[in-house]
Image (cartoon, rainbow, N blue to C red):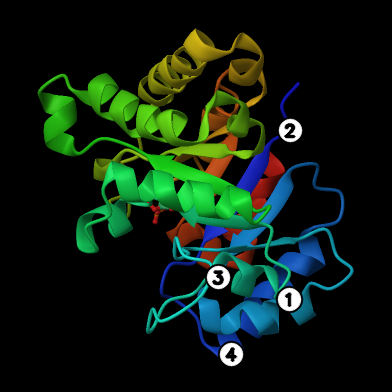
Amino acid sequence: MRKTIIAGNWKMNANKDSVKSLIGGILSGIGGINSEVVVCVPFPYLAQVESLIDGSDLRLGAQNLNINPKGAFTGEVSAEMIKDFGVKHVIVGHSERRSFYGETNTVVAEKIKAALDAGLTPLLCVGELLEDRETGKTEAVVEEQINAVIELVGIDSFNNIIIAYEPVWAIGTGMTATPEQAQEVHLFIRNLLGKSSENIAQKTPILYGGSMNAANAAVLISCPDIDGGLIGGAALKAEDFLQICRAG
Ligand code: 13P
């Protein structure tokens, strides 16, 4: 039985005051929630969140990392640096990084390797553009994104990888994939993993992301191959985020 995971991706949204009230709100309602709950926060707020969640069940995540362990890479942040702040999870290959910062499948695979080498659990984001879906390429795109990672780190590494299926057309648009659309791709991903290892396929958590909110979370998460959510906008309001966590 796979545990439900709800991860909030705050993206580039936070200030010290909002962090305090958002984390405070989440902590006040997290008791009794069975899902594993993670907040992936911008780098400058890792220290603040680390101290606010100390001793709680809330887990800390980051949104990116550099592939190199250290050195002359101005402006970049390594796996060891985020670990230093108690980070356990790191988002890798988000569609915004792929589209705005040119991260290819090869770079994404290298970042997954860097995260795994440091003992972090990466959340590997995959998903198709609207034009891919409209031209029947969804499965081919997702397959290529996942195969690039399997080729570099091997199928057994998926023991420590969480996959997030995020159709790009559903991110931040309010156009959630229907439960049928999402379940279809989640099952495709599980079967793809199953070609290399049935055991890994059954164990790997596959989260859905893309306009998931308090109103639609329960029905999405009730699909057999949807193991939780990666939440953007709705993760910025404590009550909405908690309702999604309760749906898990
Ligand atoms: P929204 O929930 O705002 O659509 O964002 C989803 C996402 O990109 C999470 O990584």
Label at residue 16: 4
Q: CA distance from mark 3 to mark 1?
A: 10 Å
Q: Helix, strand or loop at disc 1?
A: helix
Q: CA distance from mark 1 to mark 2?
A: 23 Å
Mark 3 vs mark 1: which is more N-terminal?
A: 3
- Please tell me which residue is depicted at 47% across the width and 16% down the height of the picture: 187
> The C terminus is located in which quarter?
top right
Label at residue 3: 2
Residue that mark 1 sits on: 50
Count numbered badges in the picture: 4
Side of 115 relative to 36 (left or right): left
Quarter assignment of residue 57: bottom right
- Please tell me which residue is depicted at 28% across the width and 20% down the height of the picture: 139
Report the mark closest to the observer, 1 or 2.
1
Q: Are dots 1 and 4 in contact, CB under 8 Å?
A: no
Q: Amino acid at mark 4?
A: Lys
